[in-house]
Every structure is written in structure tokens, then in C-alpha cells.
Image (tube, rainbow, N blue to C red):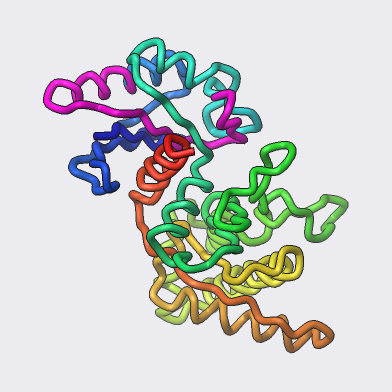
Amino acid sequence: MYACFDLGGTSLKYGLLDETGKILENGKVKVHDDVELIFDLIEKLIKSYEEANTIQGVCLSTPGAVDCERGVIYGYSALPSIHGPNWIQELEKRCQLPVSIENDANCAALAEVYRGAGKGYSDLMFLVIGSGIGGAVIKDGKIHHGKHLSGGEFGYAVFQQKDGKLQTYSDLAATVQMVEKVREAMKDDSLEGQDVFRMAEEGSKICQEAVKEFYFQLAVGIYNLQYIYDPEIIILGGGVSEQKDFVEQIEYQLDEVLRKVKIADIKPKVARCSFGPDANLEGAFLHHVMRENK
């Protein structure tokens, strides 16, 4: 059995997985930005699993630029305290079990490559759309981390300048930006992403324009990624990807981009991710097993 953990900005998801990666039980608990408390919580959960199971390893999915070999999280995230400590050393000392750690988007990508929409492909990209834009690059079936552990950090790419400020892909195409525009236009700070999509379907011109612009900017970035790396497929994830016509809207806007560019006519092949909220747990497990089998 494997104890798997997916650390997010406000919560820790956890699960007990068998040797095939099947989730036998799982749950979620809120966390705060205190790395020692997070270590304590993970240790407590592992020990609770050990009461009735033989745990073979601890598998971690976290935000940030993760050095899988050293066990250190660099970069930035919503939990500043997690950056710096050596996660592998600390948890192996506490639990006396082998520990592995990988970036959350990379974990989700591994789940898709080996068991989801990316199965059968060797070169692909995984795009996560949420409060920002992140993702992963897969080369020859393996994660490409990059020299500075920033492979897949698509959201930092600069797209244009407006009012003297450089705008990134996240500034233009993240779901939260779409929602903020509608909140400002409608003077309603209670609106969420689902409200915007629902009101667009109900005929709100403001929401329809915001949704259209969101899909167009997202498609522009996907087009750019295709010509940067030329992957076989680009898999799209994040909560917004669950919209029923999500892929169709992206396809439509990609056609618009191609119509306007003209000189380059490769249309990216896109697909919705197969895994839902448990993708990172599955991917953390796969990453751990792959390291064991090296």
C-alpha cells in the first residue's frame, strides 16, 4: 500500500492506494501556511494508515518548482513556508519509509500519460487552467523539468503590453481574470466562474463577451505552445475544463486564430483530461513507482 498526498493552497488531499494505483480510501483536510504543522499532519495520517496496512512508500504532490532528487521545493506558491525544507529527509526521518515528491501539474500529467487522455502518446503538453495557468511538458513519455525546474510554467509567458504593464498568459487567460472582469462590469463581487458561464448561457451580453475573450486568449496560448514544442496532443485540465462544451469552444477559437494568422496552419490537437480531483494522487503514486523501478 502507498500513502499519497496532494498539497494545495488551502487543503491537503490524502489517499491510500494499492499496488495497482487504485484508491482504496481518501479524504481532504484544510491546511495553513505552517510547514511544521503540515509535516505533523502527514505523519499522523501515515501512522493511521499503518494501523491496518503495510505502507511501502509515501508519495507527495505539491505546488512549486520541485527538485525531485533533493526533495526541496523552490519557486513560489500560496504556501511560502513549504519552500526551503527538505521534504524527503524530514518525512523519511519521521516515518521510516521511502518518500518521493513531484510538482502537482507534473503529477496530473503523469496520470494522463499512463492512464488517461495522453495514453499512447510520447510527446505532449498538459495545461492546467485555474487561478493561474500551469502545466507540464512530456518528452518521450517522461516529464521535462528544465534546467531551472520551470518546464511547464506556461503562465509566466509574456503575451502583450497594456498601459505600460506586461501581461502574461495567466493575466489574459486564467479563469480568475475572466471572473474579475465580470465582477467589475456587473459590480457584483459574489460572482464565481460557474455563475459567469451560466449567465452567458442565459443571455448576458457581458458574460458572453467575457467567456468569448477567455476562450480566445486560451486558444492563442495553445496555438503558441504548438509551435514552440509541436506536441502530438495538448491535454487541458483544471476545473473549467469540466464545462460541457469546453473542448468545442477551444476548437472554434483555434480555427479563428488559424484564420487570422494564415501563414501557419497546424491546428493543435486538444483533449479534455480524463482524471478529476484525484489526478494528483494518481500521478504522485506513478512517480513514486517509476522511481522505485529505475
The magenta segment = 42-71
Image mark count: 0
- Toward the left, the furthest residue is 52
Residue 200: percent from left, percent from top: 47, 75
**Vertical arrangement, residue 104 with respect to residue 238, above or below:** above
196 or 277, which is in the foreground?
277
User: What residue sits 64% from the left and 43% below the top?
Assistant: 145
214 or 151, which is in the foreground?
151
- Toward the right, the furthest residue is 164
User: What residue sits 24% from the left and 37% below the top?
Assistant: 16
Residue 130: percent from left, percent from top: 52, 53
238 or 192, which is in the foreground?
238
Membership of 23 in magenta stretch: no
Residue 244: percent from left, percent from top: 39, 75
The answer to whether residue 76 is left or right of residue 28 is: right
User: What residue sits 44% from the left and 65% below the top?
Assistant: 119
Residue 34: percent from left, percent from top: 46, 18
235 or 197, which is in the foreground?
235
The answer to whether residue 150 is left or right of residue 187 is: right
Quarter assignment of residue 38: top left
**Vertical arrangement, residue 19 with respect to residue 91, above or below:** below
**Vertical arrangement, residue 54 with respect to residue 218, above or below:** above
